[in-house]
Amino acid sequence: MAEEVKVNTIEEILENTTIADVYKAAKQLDGVAKKTKLIESPFFSDLCGNNVYLKPENLQNTGSFKLRGAYNKISQLSDEEKKIGVITASAGNHAQGVAFAAQQLGVNAVICMPATTPLLKVEATKAMGAEVVLHGDSFDDAYAKSLELQKKKGYVYIHPFNDKQVLLGQGTTALEIIDQLKDVDAILVPIGGGGFASGVALATKAVNPHVKVIGVEPEGAACMENSFARGQVSSLNFVETVADGCAVKTPGDLTYAFCKKYLDQIITVSEMEIMSALLSLIEKHKLIAEGAGVLSLAALNKLPFKGKKVVAIVSGGNIDISTISALIDKALIARGRVFCFSVLLPDKPGQLVNVAKILADNNANVIKLDHNQSKVTDSFKKVELQITVETNNHDHIQKLTKALNDAGYDVAKVF
């Protein structure tokens, strides 16, 4: 799956790539990519015991860091290559980066995307003038289709991560971080195929080798950690994660080499940790991000140190309303902020009022109620009442449950 390196071996590229290359990329991006400003976060700092700053690449042009690598790559193509046009495969953000860069540089672009890609990302890519081809259920399916079309049409391939010029463009993010926070101790960067982590780690270590660079992967798509464990580029049998931008089965051979050399550590995070981080970012900073965008935030509680200055990169914010609504609902349930339960009531007047009083006395706000008299129960003289309430936390749920039990109601948790 990894893009073939035709001129130099991976070892030669690794050895000959320097900080000068990243500064060259930064010059290419001057006036094109926003220099997103660090945001100090008292909430996330208190949460993990470090001084945390957010690098909000979700506020970048096109909504993610991917613009950096795509523009750097396409801007350095020859006139002949630009006339041919470019093609790529992407779960979404790289697609928009390539489309934006191609539009700015007057190059035709074809983007292959999984058929499962959120509509927001598909429409945003089309709006920038790119031709979108939807194919398959995963990045790897779309990637295979893009190779087929490249062979047929002769397009120049813009790999989403396994390309030197792409990862150099992504590495400009680290230059901005260090410029704004010169005494930074650690940088957290998400890993999909490894291009972002490669560029950030390369640039960081070249400027200050004492700064730790920690990659973060979802447990359901930890392709780089899997490859590290096996000692070579390896493929996962399947991936499943709410961080769809990082749903990659196989890292690049080039990015594997860069990450192996420059990354200090990889942390994996659960789906619930990702959703909880997303909810916290929205509530505490009023910032919208996608699942992959908050991986670094989800890893803050797992850092093996305290009292350090840490930058967590919020890598992207392209998420559709239905997806973000579902993720928020799940996070609220996991935190004990929403509680749905059912009780059986005697089928006679006044019972609903009794339950309502218990809820009110315990400060539980009803957001949904279903009084189902037609449902068959063990007793024809009882009806089922299903209630969804807003609660403060799991302790509040336990207190509410006890109050209902004490009043003679048998509580069955729904979610």
Image: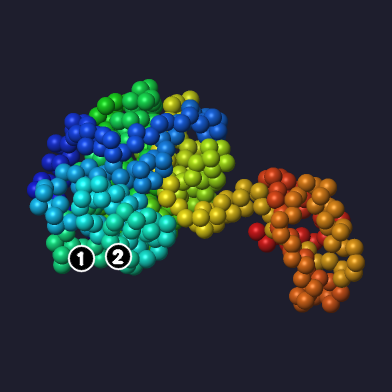
Q: Can residue 86 be seen in this view?
A: no
Kind of residue at badge 2: Val
Q: In this view, does 77 lie to the left or right of 122?
A: left
Asked if 327 appears above or below 280 in the picture, the reply is below
For the point 80% across and 61% down, which residue is it? 410
The one of 340 and 308 positioned closer to us in this rendering: 340
Query: What's the mark number on residue 198?
Result: none
Q: Find numbered disc 2 in the image and state the secondary structure of the residue it sits on.
A: strand
Q: Quadrant of residue 352?
A: bottom right
> 38 or 301, which lies in front?
38
Question: Residue 95 at what x, y percent from top left?
Answer: 31, 54
* Residue type, mark 1 in image: Leu
Spatial separation of the CA atoms under disc 1 and disc 2: 10 Å
Left/right placement of residue 8 relative to residue 307 reads: left
- Tell me if mark 1 has few (under 14), some (14-19) or many (20+) residues whose alpha carbon lies within 10 angstroms of its own: some
Which residue is label 1 attached to? 149
Expressed as whole percent of the image width and height from the top left, the position of residue 317 reads: 43, 47
State yes or no: discs 1 and 2 in contact (Cβ < 8 Å): yes
- Tag 2 residue: 133
Residue at the location (52% across, 34% down)? 44
Counting labels gives: 2
Asked whether residue 386 appears in the rendered view, the answer is: yes
Residue at the image position 19 percent from the left and 44 percent from the top? 75
Which residue is found at the position 16% from the left and 59% from the top? 155
Residue 321 place in picture, x, y as percent: 51, 55
